[in-house]
Amino acid sequence: MKSRRKFLQTLTVAGAAATLPISLMAEQTAKQKMIHQVFFWLKDGEDVKDFLKEASVLGKCKTVEKSYMGVPAPTEARSVVDHSYQVACTLFFGSIEDQIIYQTDPMHLAFIEKNSNKWSSVKVYDFVI
């Protein structure tokens, strides 16, 4: 009985301690630069070049520091490489807050409104640097 109680106490303390670094990490990452990557799978018949032109407006949003748009590179087929998307956008932000502002930027919202009917799927990967 004592060993079970001790075990539960240890788990409780470990659980509480485990949440502390998460909150500290969230505070630290909020101040770090951030990369926002968006991958688009276009519907059949959609023109990639036209979509790239439309997507280029995203790099002009006020909180975007730098942006790159492109298509899958013709690298060798390997099980870890995904060539299935048609367009990728990589946007650099000075902070997570800047990326949050970007989400409601009128140019970003207009891009979505005008072009969301052109993609069948979209995937976003965000990370701090």
Image (cartoon, grey):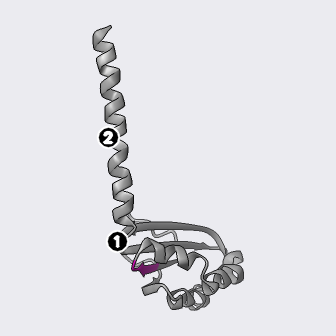
Does any portion of residue 125 appear in the rendered image?
yes
The structure residue drawn at horizontal position 39% and vertical position 79%, both measured from the top left corner, is: 94
Q: Is-magenta flag for residue 57?
A: no
User: Which label sits on residue 86?
Assistant: none
* Quadrant of the image occupied by residue 107: bottom right
Query: Which of the two discs, 2 and 1, labels the residue nearer the N terminus?
Result: 2
- Count neighbours of disc 2 (C-alpha within 10 A) and say few if under 14, some if 14 to 19, many if 20 or more: few
Q: Can you name the residue that lies furthest to the top here?
A: 1
27 or 81: nearer the viewer: 27
Does any portion of residue 45 appear in the rendered image?
no
Q: Position of residue 66 (x, y in %)?
A: 41, 87
Q: Is-magenta flag for residue 91?
A: yes
The structure residue drawn at horizontal position 36% and vertical position 75%, both measured from the top left corner, is: 33
Say what amino acid the circle numbered 1 marks: Gln
**Quadrant in the picture for the N terminus:** top left
Please say if 116 is above or below 59. Answer: above
Which stretch appears magenta? Answer: 90-94
Q: Position of residue 75 (x, y in %)?
A: 36, 75
Q: Main secondary structure of the magenta part?
A: strand
Say which of marks 2 and 1 sits in front: 2
The structure residue drawn at horizontal position 47% and vertical position 81%, both measured from the top left corner, is: 71
User: Which label sits on residue 32?
Assistant: 1
- Count neighbours of disc 1 (C-alpha within 10 A) and say few if under 14, some if 14 to 19, many if 20 or more: some
Q: Secondary structure at mark 2?
A: helix
* Quadrant of the image occupied by residue 92: bottom left
For the residues labelled 2 and 1, the Cα–Cα distance comes to 24 Å
The structure residue drawn at horizontal position 58% and vertical position 85%, both measured from the top left corner, is: 48
Please say if 119 is above or below 14. Answer: below
**Quadrant in the picture for the C terminus:** bottom left
Q: Position of residue 20 (x, y in %)?
A: 34, 47
Q: Which residue is mark 2?
A: 17
Q: Secondary structure at mark 1?
A: loop
